[in-house]
Amino acid sequence: MTLKTLEPSSGTDIKPIIHAVVLAAGKGKRLSMPWPKVLSPLWGQTLLDYVFESIADFSSQQSVTLSLSLVVGHQAEMVMKDVKEKYLESYPQTHFVQQESQLGTGHALQCFIEEAKNRLNDEDFVLVICGDTPLIKSSHILVLYNELKKQPNLDAVAATFQIDNPTGYGRIVKNSKDLGFEIREEKDASFEEKKINEVNAGLYIIKTKFLREKLKLLKNLNNSQEYYLTDIFTTTSAVKNILFYQDAISFLGVNDQEQLEVVSTEMKRRKIQDLRLTDRVFIPDSSQVHIDWKVKVGEGTILHSGTYLLGKTVIGKDCHIGPQVYLQNTILEDSVTILPFSSLERAYCARLVSVGPFARLRPESRLDESVKIGNFVEVKKSHLKKGVKVSHLSYVGDATIGQNSNIGCGFITCNYDGKNKHETTIGANTFIGSDCQAIAPIVIGDSAFVAAGTTITENVPSKAFAIGRSKQLTREGYAERFLKHDPNAIISQK
């Protein structure tokens, strides 16, 4: 995500300045989680991440300069730490506004006005958005902004929607005579007003001069004893407007785990729809896959049931994934096959790679083109070059294996001596027989041959043959000394 940095403009290059104020001070008591509400996880991100993305998308589509302010309160340090770690590099101008006592949305904006007083101009706009509304899109913000541009006399514009059960929302109370409106909060609404199902979405764009003047007049003479931002719409001197949105679900806030589940379901629906219609990915049963928001999948790829794609996983075209596959922060190029019950984390697979079934690639594993990893193979922090085959029951750790080398069943790189990790290097076109161990640090050259059952403790030159077995001793008739049963009895049964 890239946000436009707030910088002074000069000459004719004067762009409208929008101060985006994200309300993120709430406790989220009903979520019953140890983290702040806005940091609740949702498809690989937090609720707050989606709000930031929508603001960033809006600013990138418009010729505006954006200043981002985050109102924090409950567990403020945790929220600020998360934001700084993710966005400080791309947007160093983020401002944090402390709302130590949560006295309402109007009070939150009063705190913002005080903190930003040296940055605000009367000609600026203030965008107000809740940090727990991850389904709001940049297009929703754009519609509000265009309304203000279209009607220069407007002081403020608010978003509304209809909902069957409006409990908890501020009602839009309209005056039929002058087409005006007020926003009545739930606790202050009359019995008749509570029947109104057009409600306040909590998304506004307001002219700075108007906001600054009206916030000074706010009073907390209501049943919650809070300062409501919505009270700025009650003044008769306001030139205001509301915009009704059909997609009510986009404005759903998250206050408990049931609402989080509803939001999660909708977010998944959007992701699956985008993959199917835009990227032309084949997903036979979307109910049985988990795909984080940042995951990218190429055209023609098949995602079978039980597939988990997490973090910033990127999958190329014409890949075959699953069933029952786990990929986290992994990159797959085109035409890669990941067979059932395989797990890949921070791994890279070039085109035509095949992994599994029952394989594991741990972080920093790199498989070049046409590498084959078979069943019950684990690879960790290793580079396997083009055409390498590790077909079954092996562990490859801290290793480099050259092109077209073949690793037999039961091979182990003994990379850890109890204190330090050591590297194994195997050249190109080398054959390693079954049940071999390489005691690292070790180098095996190109076109070498290591016989089955060998433990390599010394370097093997290119084109060399290495064998390290104990001499076999065979004594006929001795088996009966070691067997608990009579071997002659078995022979007679046959």
Image (spheres, helix red, strand yellow):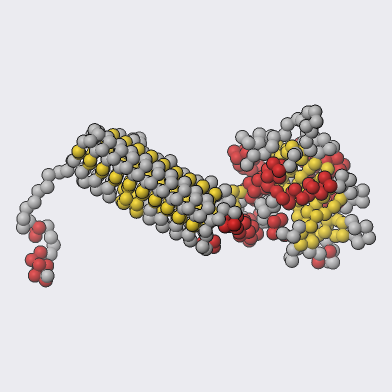
Q: Vertical placement of 14 versus 142: above or below?
A: above
Is residue 403 rendered to the left or right of residue 10?
left
The spot of residue 141 in percent (x, y) is 74, 49
The spot of residue 329 in percent (x, y) is 50, 46
Q: Vertical placement of 18 versus 300: above or below?
A: above
Residue at figure coordinates x 59%, y 57% from the top left = 277
Q: Quadrant of the C terminus?
A: bottom left
Q: State the image quarter where residue 445 is shown.
A: top left
Q: Residue furthest top?
A: 11
Depth order, front residue of 197/144: 144
Depth order, front residue of 387/262: 387
Q: In the rendered image, is residue 15 in sight?
A: yes
The spot of residue 95 in percent (x, y) is 70, 37
Q: In the rendered image, is residue 25 in sight?
A: no
Residue at figure coordinates x 72%, y 59% from the top left = 247
Is residue 331 rendered to the left or right of residue 238?
left
Task: Report the number of numbered marks.
Answer: 0
Q: Residue furthest right?
A: 177
The spot of residue 156 in percent (x, y) is 84, 48
Residue at figure coordinates x 64%, y 48% from the top left = 50
Q: Quadrant of the N terminus?
A: top right
Is residue 131 rendered to the left or right of residue 340?
right
Residue at figure coordinates x 57%, y 48% from the top left = 294
Is residue 129 rendered to the left or right of residue 174?
left
